[in-house]
């Protein structure tokens, strides 16, 4: 009976898939060089955007060698503040008038409250 028993596999230890028919993605090897001459080679996908600088293993900044440096274009919108949105709706003269009216009203209200406290 022992010769007919099934042998099991460890779960997750081995893959049942083969590498047959699998093609890796197209790649390109890019060279970077530090100011002291240290060379850094990095493998990127063929369609990847290549950065102008790369950090070497020693922590130095390496620059791209023999490549087109693409300038980084910011796709972020500039932050619109509350003040910017307010200026879209009102002019400075209107804002000064509104501020003066609100301050007069506040001073009147405070004056009446203080008179009530004294009297």
Image (cartoon, helix red, strand yellow):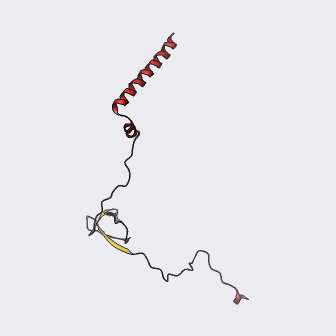
In percent of width and height, residue 84 lies at: 37, 40
In percent of width and height, residue 117 lies at: 51, 14
Q: In the image, what residue occupies the spot 62% across and 79% down?
A: 9
Q: Which sits in the foreground, 76 or 89?
A: 89
Q: In the image, what residue occupies the spot 37% across and 48% down?
A: 78
The part of the image, by quadrant, that contains residue 45 is bottom left
In percent of width and height, residue 2 lies at: 71, 88
Is residue 21 shown above or below 82?
A: below
Q: In the image, what residue occupies the spot 40% across and 40% down?
A: 85
Q: Quadrant of the N terminus?
A: bottom right
Is residue 16 shown above or below 54?
A: below
The part of the image, by quadrant, that contains residue 30 is bottom left
Q: Is residue 35 left or right of residue 11?
A: left
Is residue 77 shown above or below 59?
A: above
Q: Which sits in the foreground, 22 or 38?
A: 22
Q: In the image, what residue occupies the spot 41% across and 21% down?
A: 104
**Farthest top residue in view:** 119
In percent of width and height, residue 83 lies at: 38, 38
């Amino acid at each position: 009976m022992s010769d007919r028993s099934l042998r099991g596999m460890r779960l997750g230890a081995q893959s049942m898939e083969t590498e047959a028919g699998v093609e890796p993605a197209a790649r390109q090897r890019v060279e970077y060089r530090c100011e002291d001459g240290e060379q850094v080679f990095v493998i990127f996908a063929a369609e990847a955007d290549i950065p102008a600088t790369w950090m070497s293993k020693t922590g130095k900044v390496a620059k791209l060698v023999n490549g087109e440096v693409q300038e980084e274009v910011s796709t972020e919108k500039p932050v619109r503040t509350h003040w910017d949105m307010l200026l879209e709706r009102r002019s400075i003269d209107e804002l000064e008038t509104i501020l003066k009216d609100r301050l007069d009203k506040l001073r009147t209200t405070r004056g009446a409250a203080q008179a009530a406290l004294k009297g």
